[in-house]
Amino acid sequence: MDAMTLLHERSSMGKLTGPPPDAAQREALYRAALRAPDHKELTPWRFIEFSGKGLDRLGELFAEAEYRDDPHSGDDSLNAARKKPHRAPMVIAVIAKVTPDLPKVPPVEQVISAGCAAHGIVLAAHALGLGAMWRSGHYAFHSTVRKGLGLGEHDEIVGFLYLGQLAGRHKPLPERDPADFVERWS
Ligand SMILES: Cc1cc2nc3c(=O)[nH]c(=O)nc-3n(C[C@H](O)[C@H](O)[C@H](O)COP(=O)(O)O)c2cc1C
């Protein structure tokens, strides 16, 4: 796939199945992430990769978050939270490691950089013929999940990237016209 086709046609895939990306594919995904634009070369990125029993551990964190929000949560909603990471054979949490009070690189720029790293991963996944879906949900902002994943006070979870083999069809691409988004000063 040529680069422009990838950039114009990347698409998310929520229906994913095993096997998880192999070692060479994972290496390629992370290499794409590490080319994110990065002001002052802070490398403000951290990745946690979940597969196998790791997905169970992430599910337990989600269930704990659910329980803390509502201690009356029934088994159904706790089990639904536990199952969420199992929507894919592999999940990567992309975390912005934010250094506050830097003179030239405010926190927002560091979070954007981590977002670009996440985009690098989903683009690379598409190029490799893998499926990818970037999700946050309220868990990405929940103190229980943040603590469980070892985030620092200023860090942000920019997303959980669900990755695996395609188990469905890509939905049609939306018709968007650049003219609707671009104004030109010339
Ligand atoms: C930061 C971020 C968080 C997102 N969180 C969710 C989410 O929790 N659930 C969801 O269904 N889609 C979420 N999305 C959107 C999907 O990843 C996807 O972009 C959307 O379904 C449109 O599909 P497309 O990427 O094929 O255009 C999120 C996207 C971003 C950038």
Image (spheres, rainbow, N blue to C red):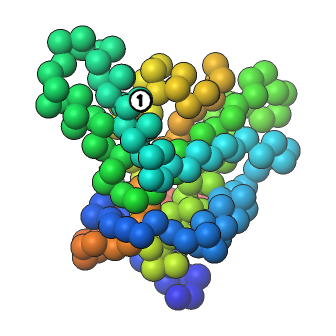
Q: How many marks?
A: 1
The image shows residue 146, relative to residue 96, as above or below, that is above
For label 1, the residue is: 61
The image shows residue 169, relative to residue 73, as above or below, that is below
**What residue is at 22 percent from the left and 37 percent from the top?**
80
Splitting the image into 4 quarters, where does residue 108 fall? top right
| Residue 157 visible somewhere in the drawing | yes
Disc 1 residue type (three-letter): Leu
Q: Is mark 1 within 8 Å of ligand 1?
A: no
Splitting the image into 4 quarters, where does residue 177 fall? bottom left
The picture places residue 157, in percent across and down from the top left corner, at: 53, 36
67 with respect to 155 (left or right):
left
Query: In the image shown, does 1 or 92 lie closer to the viewer?
Result: 92
The image shows residue 31, relative to residue 106, as above or below, that is below
Q: Residue furthest bottom?
A: 1
Q: Residue furthest front?
A: 53
Splitting the image into 4 quarters, where does residue 61 fall? top left
**What residue is at 56 percent from the left and 62 percent from the top?**
121
Dot 1: what SS? helix
The picture places residue 176, in percent across and down from the top left corner, at: 34, 69
The picture places residue 10, in percent across and down from the top left corner, at: 44, 72
The quadrant of the image that shows the C terminus is bottom right
The picture places residue 26, in percent across and down from the top left corner, at: 60, 66
**What residue is at 63 percent from the left and 74 percent from the top?**
24
26 with respect to 160 (left or right):
right
**What residue is at 44 percent from the left and 61 percent from the top?**
163
Query: In the image shown, does 152 or 84 lie closer to the viewer?
Result: 84
| Mark 1 surroundings within 10 Å by alpha-carbon count, few (fewer than 14), some (14 through 19), many (20 or more) | many
159 with respect to 95 (left or right):
left
The image shows residue 102, relative to residue 32, as above or below, that is above
60 with respect to 155 (left or right):
left
| Residue 179 visible somewhere in the drawing | no
